[in-house]
Structures are given as structure tokens and as C-alpha cells.
Amino acid sequence: MKKRIALLPGDGIGPEVLEAAVDVLKSVAEHYQHEFEFEYGLIGGSAIDEAGVPLPEETVAVCKAADAILLGAVGGPKWDQHPSELRPEKGLLAIRKQLDLFANLRPVKVFESLADASPLKKEYVEGVDFVIVRELTGGLYFGKPSEQYVNQDGEQAAVDTLFYKKTEMERVIREAFRMAKGRTGKVTSVDKANVLESSKLWRKTAEEAAGEFPDVKLEHMLVDNAAMQLIYAPRQFDIVVTENMFGDILSDEASMLTGSLGMLPSASLSSSGLHLYEPVHGSAPDIAGQNIANPLAAILSAAMMLRTSFGLEAEAKAVEHAVDQVLQSGKRTKDLAKGSEHCTTQSITEEVKAALADDNAISNIMTAYV
Ligand code: IPM
Ligand code: MN
């Protein structure tokens, strides 16, 4: 299979973890006889530095010419004082909006070997396996007006608008229901319907969608309760669907069940079929360039790309299995290591590639014998 992949490294640890994922993808291509072509694009702070804007048009063109997009991370203190239009985060929001990447899937799966790496007790997190489906192109992040101003009484003020059209709610909620069908068949819709108008409409929309999926169970949960339930009884969840900002907050919280934010991959799905994959973590400027970042979230994001964009299920499983093998053998990057011994970004990537090669050798032998 021949595929073209757009690579947007971004800032901080973005380039390091992205290179790790590319390395693994090259191994996959080699073992399974695929051809992956990589094309780079600027985004975030590095795009501001080199091209004057957080999302140059050229980057959008590179993405549109690709079959899938893999992104590192954006942001850093260097650009903190910039006006909002010239902040790195604007680049990420703009690509999400321009490519209509409305459904952000964030799987939260606790690897058996990492159950004791979570700050929560092992018996709470063992077996956790759910997906947060976060709406990604609406809500507070994109509502107009959004501005700082001086109020009539002369005091400084600021406003953000939580705006959603019903159709925007509908499409992401439907996506959640479709996903639940292939799993245990339960959707938890998270909102704040006891206060917000947008949440009341969200709840109504979820109820209507439920009618189209009679074999999926729908439950509603208020977001403050959901924040508590995620810690108290995380195994109750299968598919969690929620609006943009709630999803942002809950997914960072949920990452701690897995031991580290460095473990969570994500896929952002569009209506056009051109999807974007990125680790949930940020650019971690404090550890950038030190070869200590955990690349597993980026590598697992690449696995999601193989499965979802290219339909390469066996290859995706092989990457996930290789990551599992490496963790089972006790290898850890600094974020997960208990003692002072730990793997570097590059060395754990080599371990994943070695596990992938071993797996491949075994399956080749098996095929030879069948
Ligand atoms: C994420 C990030 C972004 C978001 C930031 C960098 C704009 O936190 O992908 O979760 O809030 O969506
Ligand atoms: Mn976030």
C-alpha cells in the first residue's frame, strides 16, 4: 500500500516524539511492504518564527495533499506574550477548523503492566478501557464574540461564547454511538444541563440520536460528577461523548489513570476522510531537546492512523502489541520510571522497533508453516 503522510512536528517535544513515530512507521513499512511518503509542514510557534503565522497556507496545502496527518505538539513560553492571533495554539485550532476535524477520539486504556504506575490504586484502574469522544470544532474555543474590553463602568472585562449548532452536536454524538456499537454498547453523554442552555440542547440531541441506535444504552452525566466518577469508578465508562472544553479537561484528568499523559494517543476525524493524529500531551517545553520525552503516545497515535485512515488493522495491532511488550519487559521513560534508571526517547523507540521486528519474524515463521 502506498500512502502519503503529512508531518507537523510543532514545538517543544513535538519534533522528538514525532520522529519516534515516523521511525516506527518506517519499520512497519519495511516489515509489511508498504510505501509511506512523508512531507513536513510548519505549525505553532516554530511556524510563527519561520513564516510569521501559526498556520501557513503551505502547511494546509501539504495536509490536503496527504492521506493522513500526524502532529507533534504546539506551544511554549517563548510565545506567551504574543497577541492571541499569533499564539501557537491558534495554529492547532485553525487546522482543526479548516479541515473540519470535528470528532476527537481519545482512548484511555490502562496497560496491564502500567496499572501500578498510576497515582491511583491499582484496583481502581486495572482493566480501564474507554474512549473520550470530544467535540473539536465548536464551543468556547470558537465562539464569537471572544474578546477583552473595558466595561461601561470602566472595569476590564472579557467574554467567551459557548455556541453550538444542533447539527454540530448531532454529528459528534452519532459518531460516539457508532463507536459504541462495536464495543460494549454504552454511551455516557457528559454535559452541564442543570445550568447551561447549550447543555440542554446537547442532552436533547443525545436523546434523539439514541433513538437511531436502539442497541446502544445512553446515560447522561453532569460534568462535575463525571470528573469525580472518572477517579472513583473509571471502569464504568465505555464511550464518553462531550463538548470541546469539557472533553479537554476530562481527558487530561483521565490520562492519569494510565500512569502518564505521555501514554494517550488521539485521532481527530473529519467529514472529508482526511484525519489527523496527535498525542494528547502538550509540547512540554521544560523537557524539550533532552531526549527524555515519552514517545509512546505519538507512536500509539501512528497506530490509530494505520487502523483508521489506512485500514491496516494487523499493522496497527502489531504496533500496539510491540508497545505492550516493551512495557511488560519493564522499560520505562522518565515520566513512568520509579527509580533513577530510565529509557531515553530514542532508546524506547528502538525497543518498540525491535519488538515489532521480533513479532514480524515470528509471524513470518508461522506463515511459512501453515
Ligand atoms: C489539546 C490541547 C489543545 C486544546 C491546546 C494546545 C489548544 O490542550 O489538544 O488538548 O485545548 O485543545
Ligand atoms: Mn488539552
Image (cartoon, rainbow, N blue to C red):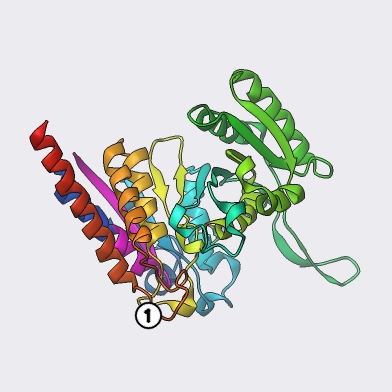
Q: Which residue is mark 1?
A: 290
Name of the residue lying farthest toward the left = 368
Residue 67 position, x and y percent, is: 30, 43
- Could you say which quadrant of the image residue 220 lies in? top right
Residue 249 in the figure: left or right of residue 48: right
Report if residue 37 lies within the magenta region. Answer: no
Whether residue 38 appears in this view of the structure is no
Q: Residue at x 58, y 38 (%)?
A: 239
In what quadrant of the picture does the C terminus appear? top left
Residue 49 position, x and y percent, is: 41, 74
Q: In this picture, is 185 found above or below 274?
A: above
Q: Nearer the viewer, residue 8 or 319?
A: 319
Report if residue 16 lies within the magenta region. Answer: yes
Residue 189 position, x and y percent, is: 67, 37
- Could you say which quadrant of the image residue 51 lies in? bottom left
CB of residue at label 1: within 8 Å of ligand 1?
no
**Range drawn in magenta:** 1-21
Q: Residue at x 43, y 60 (%)?
A: 55
* Type of amino acid at the residue the image marks with label 1: Gln
Q: Nearer the viewer, residue 25 or 270?
A: 25
